[in-house]
Image: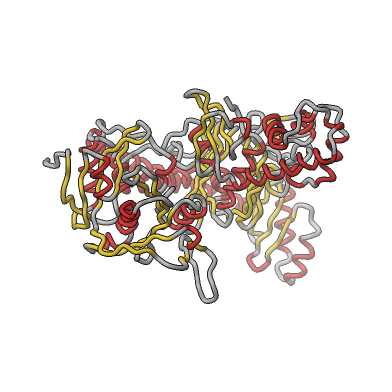
Amino acid sequence: MKKEMRAFDVLAVVSEAQSLIGGFVDKIFQWDGGNVLIRVNVKGEGKKELFLKDGKWFYLAPQRPQVPDFPDQFAVHLRKLISNARVESVRQVEFDRIVVIDIMRGEQYQLVIELFGEGNLLLVKDGKIVNCLFSRRWRHREVRPGAEYLFPPNRFNPLESDLQSFTSTIKESTSDTIRTLATSVNLGGQYAEEVCLRADVDKASDASSLSEEQISTLFRTMMDLVQQVKESSDPRIVFEGEDMVDVTPAPLVQYSESRADNHSVFSEALHEYLGGEPEPLEITDKALLKLQRQLEHQRESIERRKAEAEELSNNAELLYMNYKQVDDLLNLLKSMKGSSWEEIRSFSESIDIVRSVDPSKHRVSVLLEEKKVSLDYELGIDSNANKLYDSAKGLREKARRAEEALQNTETKIEKRKKGLAKVEESREGANPTKQFWFERYKWFLTSSEKLVIAGRDARTNDQVVKKHLKPEDRYAHADVHGAPSVVFKEGSEAQEEELREVCIFALAHSKAWNAGVKEGSAYWVLPDQVSKAPMAGEFVPRGGFIIRGKRNYFHHIVMEMAVGEISYQGERKIMGAPKETMESMSERYVIVAPGKTERSRISSKLAKRFEVPEEEISRILPPGNLEIVGSKGIPLEE
């Protein structure tokens, strides 16, 4: 079983993480040693979770991992420095298992993720390590706060190689082909073998004996594989029997005889391979979340005030520890009261401990034992020290009052949690069904059990088309502005009734449902009619597409949907689908239509009837309020 990421895996994740560029660092959490979660706000896409798991795995978590209620000191320090920092770039270093995230918040920082050994995460500024998860020492480098950060020694970088450098490396080798590709060319054993298989070159042959044609074929194959991994369009989890044995960003020839599960995104495949469960289905209580955020802010404020108070007290002590130097300086500056500002500045700069002077505010900044201390030079040393002590005392008093407020917040949280306990009890009989990759989108299975997926937002709207719309599929859309893009997988041979089901689904998940209309129109088109490229005068918003050519309409679609129990790949699932679809696939379902009952009340009611968490129902219902207008095999009486 795969125990750590390979350079090709890192390449795939870095390609996916380009979506973070332009986003802003939100929260940072760290727990259990090597687990770090970096939350990034991306405009138009919401929050994304960048996850370092056990120091060895790094990906965009499709569901938020369980994080501690309160950040530890490492996370607090990073938050203080880089919260709200803008993500400038995400890059892999020299095809190594190192990722650098360049961020800017007034000053440039680098978050460095090392995925070799036991793993590490470091914050670097101006080439110096500001903080790191783990301090370590090697013969050629040292990792600790304050040390200069040095990357490991460079090796061959296949991403930046050309045929000439590749040929030289092969010809100079004294080993066989697979070992040369694995070590000298830096592909690693698995991908060295993959390149040999794809290029049809004997891996056991001496590398130096290969012909120019064979070397050229190996090079082209390697670069094709690199490009395929960069696109990461068909990630796989590979099985032996029922056991997962590998996860790859692209299909590998060496696994052509093995069972594999397809995923649309490599990060999702990694998450599942590592035993990642979907986000725990929990009650979303806005009041409780607000109180927990308030508590977190209060803790941070208390820590900050105490630290500032400690620093001010230490500064006062430094004045007395350097009494003569400071006293002489203050007396000299005081004696220059009638001098010009320029004279005061010029005189001050000649004194070793002075770092800056501001005559307009009669302030002087001095360096005492590597600490900068700001003083009022119109006051004596005792008065300056007393002002520092008084400021520290004021901050400690504020921290004390904040601790009282924190205790009050903790009491409110406990009270709120007790109030939710009864609601939690009602969920005890709920059994979440198995999750499938397509559930990140809106989805249903047609009456012939073909998959249909649709976007939930602008980002997933783009994804369903760019990643999943193939020539053998069909595209559907409601005749309503802002409706989701719908992809009917393998829909090229579908009959008219099945295409109608897809159009019903497209209309039901549009704004038409929210508007409460009784019927509407939707259409389907061929994949090559769907374009992102605008013509002159056209504008395509994020998540939107342009349809060219004939649209195949269904009119007078009645606005009804069904929620029912089906079997998919031997697993029980609760599906939201057109009524006509459900009639042929389920013996237990309800029919819903636009109405006046709050969506949450219907979700709660159906969750009890189907014995699943309420969130499973909520994710498959149409948008807006609704009413139950019929059922089969489901008692709806309270």
- Please state the horizontal and vertical placement of residue 97, each as a whole percent of the image: 67, 37
For the C terminus, the image quarter is top left
The colour scheme used here is secondary structure
In the image, 321 versus 487, the foreground residue is 487
- Classify 584 as above or below 183: below
Query: Residue 204: horizontal and vertical position, in percent?
Result: 77, 25
Residue 565 left/right relative to 289: left
Q: Residue furthest right?
A: 172
Between 212 and 571, the residue placed more toward the observer is 212
Front-most of 373 and 265?
265
The residue at the point 65 percent across, 55 percent down is 107
Residue in front for this viewpoint, 288 or 578: 578
Picture quadrant where residue 608 is located: top left
Count of labels shown? Answer: 0
Q: Quadrant of the N terminus?
A: top right
Tell me the quarter of the picture where residue 408 sits: top left
Q: Is residue 54 left or right of residue 150?
A: left
Compared across the picture, whether 460 is left or right of 433 comes to right
Residue 55 rendering spot, x and y as whole percentages: 59, 33
Write the residue at 65% across / 64% down: 362
Residue drawn where x is 54% and y is 51% of the image: 25
The outermost residue toward the bottom is 537
Query: From where the camera sits, is residue 305 visible?
Result: no
* Residue 301 shows in the view: yes
Q: Judge whether 555 appears above or below 162 on screen.
A: below
